[in-house]
Image: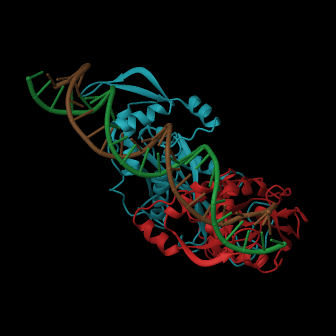
Chain colours: A cyan, B red, C green, D brown
DNA sequence: TCAAAAGTGTTTCGGGTACACCCATGT
DNA sequence: ACATGGGTGTACCCGAAACACTTTTGA
């Protein structure tokens, strides 16, 4: 690649080698088994048959986030409730084929397996893996996943993104379990409820969830109330 | 990754356009005029003569952070005390010449104008601008600067990076002023001193700074004490 | 009637915040 | 002696944390 100008379809030329640029996504979901991550099985070399993060090449006239959304839609068809850039990984040898720089994103999904997970595009298969049963990943995707996990832990306390992992209506117990899983520590039920409710960003519905045990009231995250509060300098913190 | 590997003759080739990849750095310094940012005047089209962030192209076998350090050294010769990846900007039209994706970094420097700021490499000139007298910047560098400023504000409270903006020995007043500038709010002197000292990460030296008024004791940031404390689950927070 | 999960108050403790005066030096 | 910045202690308040029993349902 030291041949100076590597003509792409773009019409100008720099006297520099051009790395390939990809996007990769760490998609988190939350269910019975706690936190899960969506992986795809590679259908091609290198690392054929191994599990990897969904992702692919950025197109010529496409923003980075757009590319992430497109690839994710092509490979899995999921509907995202949250997507944010994570970090850019560019170690010279991270791809055995040559220089590939990847802009990593992390995303949240409200329900596991909304549509019965299709695997199209480059992916030979797509599957949710819960934390703890994660396989070895292709490339440096294991590192990327680790960074994403840390970011999620760090962010969930300061921004109301936890709700993006739950269905529209949820019980306070579900919310608490989510926080316990993400933060990896136990929380006190009464303190948690008091704190969450005192924020004034949950709307109490009339719906109840029934199942074993006493029925539980369902709540909804009130985006508007949150936006208003935030504009007034309110800080989330949980 | 649809047709991932179309083998080309030399090394490898993807059937995708390749954007150019650059790094850009927001370098912060702290002095009499508060917070300052280092800018370079562009010597080439586009935006000739305009001020911009120091930066340049990533080389073929060079990590992203290495590229940032190299460019900064070439253009300004500064010694950095802190450098961290910030965000990657890749809007399709951010560079009028074609697709250029830039990985932005932000850096801290202990003293303004350590060596009498050289401007070499692509830079026609290099100069510190204090906040408030910032000129219009080339490309989307104004946005990048804004994101960096936010990150600095957010991070300074949770990680001891404020010290990286001060000389090795500093007074508590200097530290307080730094925090007031970065956070953009006044702090109570007594509370600030109590809090900082209670963290146990400052080493009290026997040196005093003399000047108008009563002499002030000089302190040093104790990296080791911090590392030990952090390993014990201590959280910085100021 | 039993198992399962939901729901509910009070006390204690520590850290955050507000606040005003004396001290050491240079001019 | 005066101007300049450095340095110090206390009282109050609020939010965090600890802690156990009653309620409602389905089986």
Q: Position of residue B143 (x, y in %)?
A: 75, 53
| Nearest the eye: B1 or B92 | B92
Q: Give the number of callouts.
A: 0
In the rendered view, does A5 fall on the left or right side of A193? right
Q: Find the residue positioned furthest to the right.
A: B49
Q: Position of residue A187 (x, y in %)?
A: 35, 44
**Relative vertical location of residue A114 with respect to residue B4 in this rendering, above or below:** above
Q: Which quadrant does the N terminus of chain B fall into?
A: bottom right
| Nearest the eye: A197 or A91 | A197
| Nearest the eye: B29 or A128 | B29
Q: Position of residue A14 (x, y in %)?
A: 79, 70
Q: Which quadrant does the C terminus of chain B fall into?
A: bottom right
| Nearest the eye: A85 or A121 | A85
On the image, which quarter does residue B117 sit in? bottom right
Q: Is residue B75 visible?
A: yes
On the image, which quarter does residue A48 sit in? bottom left
**Relative vertical location of residue C8 with respect to residue A189 in this rendering, above or below:** above
Q: Is residue A43 visible?
A: no
Name the residue at 79% across, 76% down.
B75
Q: Position of residue A135 (x, y in %)?
A: 36, 60
In the rendered view, does B216 fall on the left or right side of A187? right
In the rendered view, does D4 fall on the left or right side of B226? right
Name the residue at 53% across, 29% down.
A222
On the image, which quarter does residue A209 sit in? top left
């Amino acid at each position: 690649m030291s041949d100076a100008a590597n003509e792409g379809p773009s019409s100008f030329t720099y006297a520099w080698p051009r790395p390939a640029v990809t996007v990769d996504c760490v998609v988190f979901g939350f269910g019975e088994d706690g936190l899960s991550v969506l992986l795809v099985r590679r259908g091609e070399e290198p690392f054929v048959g191994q599990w990897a993060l969904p992702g692919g090449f950025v197109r010529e006239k496409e923003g980075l986030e757009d590319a992430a959304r497109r690839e994710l839609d092509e490979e899995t068809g999921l509907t995202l409730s949250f997507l944010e850039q994570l970090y850019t990984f560019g170690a010279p040898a991270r791809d055995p084929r040559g220089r590939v720089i990847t802009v990593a994103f992390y995303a949240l999904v409200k329900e596991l397996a909304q549509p019965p997970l299709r695997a199209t595009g480059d992916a030979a298969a797509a599957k949710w893996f819960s934390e703890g049963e994660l396989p070895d990943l292709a490339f440096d995707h294991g590192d990327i996943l680790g960074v994403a996990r840390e970011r999620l832990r760090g962010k969930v306390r300061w921004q109301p993104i936890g709700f993006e992992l739950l269905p529209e209506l949820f019980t306070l117990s579900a919310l608490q379990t989510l926080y316990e899983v993400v933060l990896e520590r136990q929380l006190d039920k009464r303190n948690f409820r008091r704190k969450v409710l005192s924020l004034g960003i949950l709307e109490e519905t009339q719906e109840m969830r029934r199942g074993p045990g006493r029925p539980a009231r369902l709540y909804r995250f009130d985006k508007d109330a949150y936006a208003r509060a935030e504009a007034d300098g309110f800080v989330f913190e949980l």
